[in-house]
Amino acid sequence: MDQLRALTAFVAVADAGTLSGAARSLSLSPPSITRLVGDLEAHVGTQLFHRTTRSVTLTEAGTAYLIDARKILAAVQAADDAARGANERPQGTLRLTASVLFGQHYISPIVAEFLKRFPEVSVDALFVDRIVNIVDEGIDLAVRIGHLPDSALIASRVGKVRWVLCASPDYIEKNGVPMSPEELADHDIIGFGPYRIENWSFRDNKTVAVHPRLSLSTVSGTIEAAKHGLGLTRVLSYQIGPELGDSGLRTVLTNWEKEPVPIHLVHAEGPLGSAKVRAFKSFAADALRSNHFLN
């Protein structure tokens, strides 16, 4: 068995959630993917996936094995890059992660320009609303929003964001502008998540309990609802940067906002790490620091 090839197929299936999706990503046939995963399961002596006619999901053993598989493949990629001289010029696959909206609004345009400038680099971007363990999941560089815990990771501050309240001009025209957090009780509130009561915090350690009239499961959903005039919502400023002004949202209670929270680029490699990480970090840092929505 070609274990490295089997590990690659295993990770592709875990990422795609289907055998056919993994086959397309690796330009292999579904039977080839099935055989590689089957050989790997026989080799380790345990089932790595639960299979149905529509999808595959990781078993408990498979979930644990995936972490090590990603580390192995990342180490092989790093060795290949070093042998090819990747520490001298940017090349190879760069894996990065950010939250969904930040990735869509701010990182994707940077990636597009980066790929034009560095034709020997490819990018695998993971945009998810969870904290990704960049070491365990083989990520080269991550965007972190918020204060960072102490760790061995290397961080560079590239901006800041604020918690803001916003609504559409139509809603404000009909309902007026709240002048203090207490006046939120007189307004329709759009909440995030299945919460009947939310506690919104402001400067001077002030907290107000609000009762959402509408709650949605995604931040993008709350923004769309606000744009349609259904009430006030609370989001991070970067999440509505493209929606401000003529696009249909206005911020309120700006004099009650808390201190901004920082944005960092985080990676595990030191200053002598691969050129692709160094190049993207420098390229992205310049672009983010110059973006007025992030400063």
Image (spheres, rainbow, N blue to C red):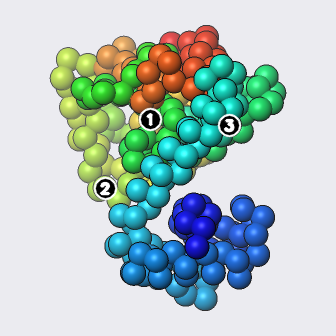
Between discs 1 and 3, the one toward the N terminus:
3
Q: Are marks 1 and 3 in contact (CB under 8 Å)?
A: no
Q: Which amino acid does label 2 sit on?
A: Tyr
Looking at the image, is mark 3 or mark 2 nearer the viewer? 3
Looking at the image, is mark 1 or mark 3 nearer the viewer? 3
Q: Please report the residue visible at 44 percent of the width from the left and 61 percent of the height from the top.
A: 66
Q: Please report the residue visible at 41 percent of the width from the left and 70 percent of the height from the top.
A: 62
* Separation of residues labelled 1 and 3 (CA atoms): 36 Å
Give the numbered dot on residue 276: none
Residue 145 visible from this viewpoint: yes
Between discs 1 and 2, the one toward the N terminus:
2
The N terminus lies in which quarter of the figure? bottom right
Q: Please report the residue visible at 72 percent of the width from the left and 61 percent of the height from the top.
A: 25
Q: Are marks 1 and 2 in contact (CB under 8 Å)?
A: no
User: Pointer 3: what residue?
Assistant: 92
**Which quarter of the picture shows residue 174?**
top right
Provide residue 209's location: percent of width, then percent of height.
Answer: 23, 41
Residue 59 horizontal side relative to residue 168, left or right: left
Residue 229 visible from this viewpoint: no
Q: What residue type is labelled 1?
A: Val
* Separation of residues labelled 3 and 2 (CA atoms): 44 Å
Provide residue 21's location: percent of width, then percent of height.
Answer: 69, 69
Q: Which residue lies furthest to the left in this view?
A: 205
Q: How crowded is mark 2: few (under 14 residues within 10 Å), some or many (20 or more)?
A: some
> Does residue 115 sit above or below 261 in this rendering?
below
